[in-house]
Image: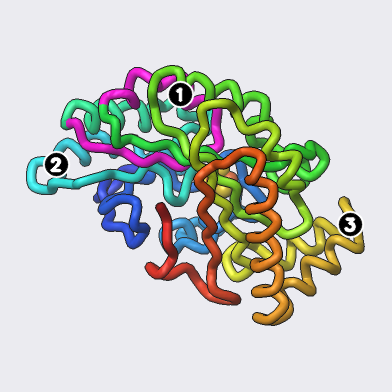
């Protein structure tokens, strides 16, 4: 892993994602290196040409820059981590996310955080200050064999469950994020059984092949999981009609499974073969 401490010109960036008006990414790159990660398509991330998952730029002065920016910017809500994982292992060493959260908490600005890391459980004292704070916790791959191929370095489901329970105990809102949902790679019925008590909201975000390293994913599945599943995945994304049929099927299937749970269920369905736009409806 190539790790560099870098200086940043800007901490707060405007975001099109409707969950917040500003986003902060404390790192560029990500130690977890998920095979499907969309962040590799981000123009700032592309400034590094090394393979995704092999580098990490630590924005070491981001807290200092944020302090300065907050003298003239008034965010209504800040999202942490749109192109990186704020709670990746090296956060224990550099503590950039921690320092940012201390500042955000001192101003009582609500935060929205996207994570799949159990390290967040060590941050509850920095997250329970505002009832509007919300954690979108990615929850996938109850089949370890699939996980080892698509995101082998991320925390196991058991560790995520423990962290989610701790957040809930501390009255921090958690929404389960099943995404990107790669067709034929997840058994939703089994996955739902692992969702911890206290969770009320679940969202399912369908995989975007344009952003998600599609060719490598299809080939990895073919070599290491199943030729049939790989062919079925390729077919699903071969035309808008196949893709829309799959999304309709998934929606019905999820709603049927949800009859046993009664979660507030939300779907995020990217348009076929397109980049993300501000039309995407997050809740
Ligand atoms: S944890 Fe998130 S940011 Fe990091 S590689 Fe995986 S999907 Fe990308």
Q: Furthest-front residue in view?
A: 259
Q: Does the segment drawn in magenta span residue 113? A: yes
What secondary structure is found at the residue carrying circle 2? loop
Q: Which residue is mark 2?
A: 70
Mark 2, other Cα within 10 Å: few <14 / some 14–19 / many ≥20: some
The reply to whether the C-beta atoms of the residues labelled 1 and 2 are less than 8 Å apart is no
Mark 1, other Cα within 10 Å: few <14 / some 14–19 / many ≥20: many
Above or below 83: residue 278: below
Beta carbon of the mark 1 residue lies under 8 A of ligand 1: no
Q: Earlier in the sequence, mark 3 or mark 2?
A: 2
The label number, if any, that marks residue 59 in the structure image: none
Judged left or right of residue 79, residue 218 is right
Residue 252 is drawn in which quadrant? bottom right
Q: Measuring 19% from the left and 31% from the top, which residue is drawn there? A: 108
Residue 187 position, x and y percent, is 76, 47
The reply to whether the C-beta atoms of the residues labelled 3 and 2 are less than 8 Å apart is no
The range drawn in magenta is 108-129
Residue 213 position, x and y percent, is 65, 63
Above or below 243: residue 197: above
Residue 255 position, x and y percent, is 63, 53
Residue 154 is drawn in which quadrant? top right
Beta carbon of the mark 3 residue lies under 8 A of ligand 1: no
What secondary structure is found at the residue carrying circle 1? helix
Can residue 89 be seen from the camera position used here?
yes
Q: Which residue is mark 3?
A: 223
Q: Measuring 59% from the left and 76% from the top, which residue is drawn there? A: 273
Q: Measuring 65% from the left and 74% from the top, which residue is drawn there? A: 244
The label number, if any, that marks residue 167 in the structure image: 1
């Amino acid at each position: 892993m190539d790790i560099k401490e870098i200086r940043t010109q800007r901490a707060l960036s405007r975001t099109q994602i409707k969950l917040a008006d500003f986003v902060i990414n404390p790192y560029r790159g990500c130690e977890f290196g998920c095979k499907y990660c969309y962040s590799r398509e981000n123009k700032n991330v592309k400034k590094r040409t090394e393979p995704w998952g092999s580098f990490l730029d630590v924005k070491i002065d981001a807290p200092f820059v944020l302090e300065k920016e907050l003298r003239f910017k008034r965010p209504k809500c800040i999202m942490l981590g749109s192109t990186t994982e704020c709670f990746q292992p090296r956060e224990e060493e550099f503590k950039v996310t921690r320092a940012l959260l201390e500042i955000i908490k001192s101003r009582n600005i609500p935060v929205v955080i996207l994570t799949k890391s159990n390290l967040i459980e060590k941050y509850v004292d920095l997250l329970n200050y505002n009832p509007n704070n919300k954690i979108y916790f990615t929850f996938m791959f109850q089949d370890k064999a699939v996980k080892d191929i698509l995101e082998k370095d991320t925390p196991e489901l058991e560790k995520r469950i423990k962290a989610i329970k701790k957040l809930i105990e501390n009255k921090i809102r958690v929404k389960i994020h099943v995404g990107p949902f790669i067709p034929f790679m997840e058994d939703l019925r089994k996955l739902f059984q692992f969702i911890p008590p206290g969770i009320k909201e679940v969202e399912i975000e369908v995989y975007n092949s344009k952003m998600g390293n599609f060719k490598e994913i299809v080939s990895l599945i073919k070599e290491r999981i199943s030729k049939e599943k790989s062919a079925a995945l390729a077919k699903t994304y071969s035309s808008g009609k196949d893709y829309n049929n799959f999304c309709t099927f998934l929606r019905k299937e999820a709603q049927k499974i949800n009859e046993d749970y009664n979660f507030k269920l939300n779907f995020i369905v990217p348009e076929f073969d397109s980049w993300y736009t501000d039309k995407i409806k997050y809740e």
